[in-house]
Image: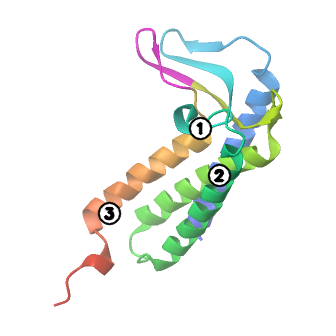
Amino acid sequence: MLTAGVAALALALDLWTKEWAWQNLRREPAKVIIDGFFQLDYAFNTGSAFGFLRGLEWSRYFFIVITVAAVAYMARLAYSISARHLSAFIAIGLIAGGALGNLHDRFFRFDFGRHGVVDFIVVYYWPGARWPAFNIADAALVAGVLLFMIYLRRHGDPQAAPAT
């Protein structure tokens, strides 16, 4: 239940913010929040992270298949983890919610004659050096993966433990 709740919250926040960006940023100049550090600027990504496979006709279907498989795996993983480690359930929920948010866009967002994902958060990591635009789903995915890595570091893979 915790995993499903976290996934639903991440998905809802992602869809709400993307709709806001779609309505308020799509045909507008960037909204500078902190000059030289943070702004909101509409971008439409037909690829994946950093524009990987952008512009290839088959990439949309590839990402849909991979995402569905990943979400199914996350659901299976949530059922196999010990209930005493809540951080793992939160991590899996963040990963699944983020994946579902971008999956939604791949099915329903259509702009510039192609399906793609709405990105709108822009951070400058160095003066004049802009990180590629991302969205809440991407942030949830990264946070979930990092949290899951911490969980694995602390608790390891119980199935890999040597028999005593």
> Could you say where residue 112 lies in the image, as x and y percent from the top left?
81, 26
Q: Amino acid at mark 2?
A: Phe
Q: Which mark is residue 156?
A: none
Position above or below: 13 against 111: below
> Which residue bears the numbered disc 1?
53
> Which residue bears the numbered disc 3?
152
Q: Main secondary structure of the magenta part?
A: strand
Mark 3 or mark 1, which has the lower sequence index? 1
Q: Is residue 2 visible?
A: no
**Tag 2 and tag 1, C-beta contact below 8 Å:** yes
Q: In percent of the image, x 42 and y 61: which residue is there?
A: 87
> Which residue bears the numbered disc 2?
62
Around disc 1, counting alpha carbons within 10 Å, would you say few (fewer than 14), some (14 to 19), or many (20 or more)? Answer: some
Mark 2 or mark 1, which has the lower sequence index? 1
Viewer-closest of 66 and 84: 66
Segment tinted magenta in the rendering: 122-132
CA gap between label 3 and label 1 equals: 30 Å
CA gap between label 2 and label 3 equals: 28 Å
Q: In percent of the image, x 81 and y 45: which residue is there?
A: 108
Is 106 left, or right, of 62 in this rendering? right
Q: In percent of the image, x 48 and y 65: which residue is there?
A: 89
CA gap between label 2 and label 1 equals: 10 Å
